[in-house]
Image: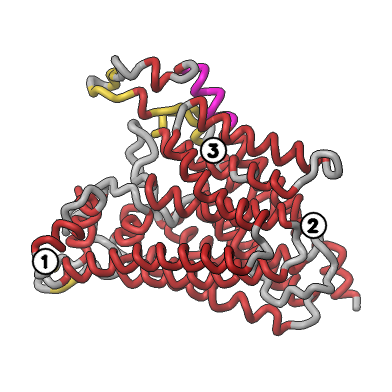
């Protein structure tokens, strides 16, 4: 009994520590996400002991083993292949532990049942809003309002004798100093912050004034940053992701509309997957598809960047195919490693190879099922559900079009997708909403 009381009494401390690590990761404080990855791994182990004590039905913990296992295999691919040799040992160790750990942290935090969901959202949104606000203020101080339009006729400046385009940059807090980064990099955090705005569809400003103000302020910071830069492509991504909130708000009980929307989304995703499968097979067999198909799957504007990555993945060194589990930066083609494809899917091919990328796709499909179950059965408010899902959609849609290999023009380190602090936060959210055995009669989290 004393042992059980110890875990019950101290779970609030663990809850605080988990949220602290997640907030610092979202803010990327000190630009040392690998440290927070290791801290998250430690807390995940501690959290497991706590949850084993406070969870009465141990069978409820089985649900998390499959996605955690998938992430562990993915992180193994990413930590011990040729591509990983470009990173430090501590960074690889952090990757190995952080991916499954952050998913588990979200799951354990829900199981501890010691905090409201809106508080979790406030911590995540506050961290994203803070880093976005720092970036916005520093950019305005350095460049001024609408500088992309002001300098469009004379955009170039010189740094170490090399010309750079100021209209493609913004200022950003990178650790303990400000530096230039590409607008696409900072806009990701602005989009995630602005993902709180669709939650306003579910809040009455009269009945829940405080919650309305919080969502409006956090979301407003992100949207303001996107308009001031401006980055209309990022705003379009936010608008597409926000369609979920609109459908969920006005057609939640309309099975016909939901069915049509579901079929459309699955069909669109299926076509995209089929497209890349055919593209990969075409490269593997030596471009033996008919000429017009080669033009479609190889020579279009998107695939011109991706095809070299696929080719390098199938390249042979010494008569052996050595890149199936991650590219070899120096032996195959270092230029391919640093090739900017703007797609996280192509970055995954570099980082963990074809097998790892397929496993990550399987993980996302599994998470999609968990999200569907969450929307259908969870007692969280519709506002919280909407913000979580819009944030996840915004992240993966954005990273499918604007993922970067290098964060800024004067930064020479590889911005790996799997080592991204924003991805760790998304995994935490996946874990938090993946508590499969949620029952209607349980106490509400709101």
Helix, strand or loop at label 1? It is loop
Q: Nearer the viewer, residue 61 or 243?
A: 243
Q: Which image quadrant for residue 27?
A: top right
Q: Residue at x 29, y 21 (%)?
A: 159
> What type of secondary structure mainly makes up the magenta span?
helix
**Label 3: how many Cα within 10 Å (few below 14, some 14–19, many 20+):** many
Q: What is the secondary structure assignment of the residue under circle 2?
A: loop
What is the x, y in percent for residue 53?
79, 76
Pair 1/2: label in front: 1
Give the total of numbered labels: 3
Q: Disc 3 to disc 1, how far (Cα)?
A: 40 Å
Which residue does the image show at 70% across and 80% down from the upper left? 60
Q: To which residue does mark 2 refer?
A: 115
Q: Are marks 1 and 2 in contact (CB under 8 Å)?
A: no
Q: Quadrant of the C terminus?
A: bottom right
Helix, strand or loop under label 3: helix
Among the two numbered marks 3 and 2 on one chain, the one whose residue lies closer to the N terminus: 2
Which residue: 70% across, 44% down? 200
Q: How is the image coloured?
A: secondary structure
Q: Read off the magenta span.
A: 133-142
| Residue ID for mark 1 | 287
Q: Nearer the viewer, residue 56 or 248?
A: 248
């Amino acid at each position: 009994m004393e042992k059980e009381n110890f875990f019950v009494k101290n779970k609030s401390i663990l809850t605080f520590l988990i949220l602290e690590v997640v907030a610092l990761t979202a803010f990327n404080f000190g630009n040392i996400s690998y440290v927070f990855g290791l801290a998250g791994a430690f807390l995940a182990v501690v959290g497991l002991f706590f949850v084993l004590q406070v969870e009465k039905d141990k069978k409820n913990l089985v649900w998390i083993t499959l996605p955690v296992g998938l992430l562990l295999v993915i992180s193994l691919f990413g930590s011990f292949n040729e591509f990983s040799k470009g990173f430090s040992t501590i960074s690889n160790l952090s990757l190995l532990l952080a991916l499954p750990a952050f998913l588990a942290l979200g799951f354990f935090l829900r199981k501890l049942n010691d905090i409201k969901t809106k508080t979790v959202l406030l911590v995540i949104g506050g961290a994203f809003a803070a880093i976005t606000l720092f970036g916005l203020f520093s950019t305005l101080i350095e460049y001024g309002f609408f500088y992309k339009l002001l300098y469009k006729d004379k955009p170039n400046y010189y740094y170490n004798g090399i010309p750079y385009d100021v209209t493609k940059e913004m200022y950003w807090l990178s650790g303990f100093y400000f530096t230039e980064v590409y607008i696409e990099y900072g806009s990701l955090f602005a989009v995630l912050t602005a993902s709180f705005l669709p939650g306003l569809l579910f809040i009455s400003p009269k009945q829940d004034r405080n919650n309305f103000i919080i969502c409006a302020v956090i979301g407003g910071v992100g949207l303001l940053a996107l308009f001031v830069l401006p980055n209309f492509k990022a705003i379009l991504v936010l608008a597409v992701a926000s369609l979920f909130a609109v459908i969920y708000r006005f057609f939640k009980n309309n099975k016909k509309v939901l069915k049509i929307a579901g079929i459309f989304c699955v069909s669109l995703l299926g076509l995209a997957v089929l497209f890349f499968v055919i593209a990969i097979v075409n490269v593997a067999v030596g471009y033996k598809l008919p000429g017009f198909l080669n033009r479609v799957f190889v020579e279009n504007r998107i695939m011109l960047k991706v095809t070299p990555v696929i080719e390098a993945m199938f390249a042979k060194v010494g008569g052996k195919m050595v890149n199936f589990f991650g590219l070899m930066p120096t032996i195959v083609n270092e230029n391919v490693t640093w090739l900017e494809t703007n797609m996280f899917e192509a970055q995954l091919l570099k980082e963990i190879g074809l097998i790892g990328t397929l496993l990550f796709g399987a993980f996302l499909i599994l998470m999609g099922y968990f999200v569907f179950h969450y929307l259908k059965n969870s007692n969280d408010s519709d506002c919280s559900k909407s913000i979580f899902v819009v944030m996840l959609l915004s992240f993966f849609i954005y990273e499918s079009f604007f993922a970067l290999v290098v964060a800024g023009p004067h930064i020479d380190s590889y911005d790996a997708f799997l080592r991204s602090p924003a991805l760790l936060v998304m995994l935490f959210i996946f874990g938090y909403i993946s508590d499969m055995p949620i029952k209607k009669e349980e106490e509400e989290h709101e």
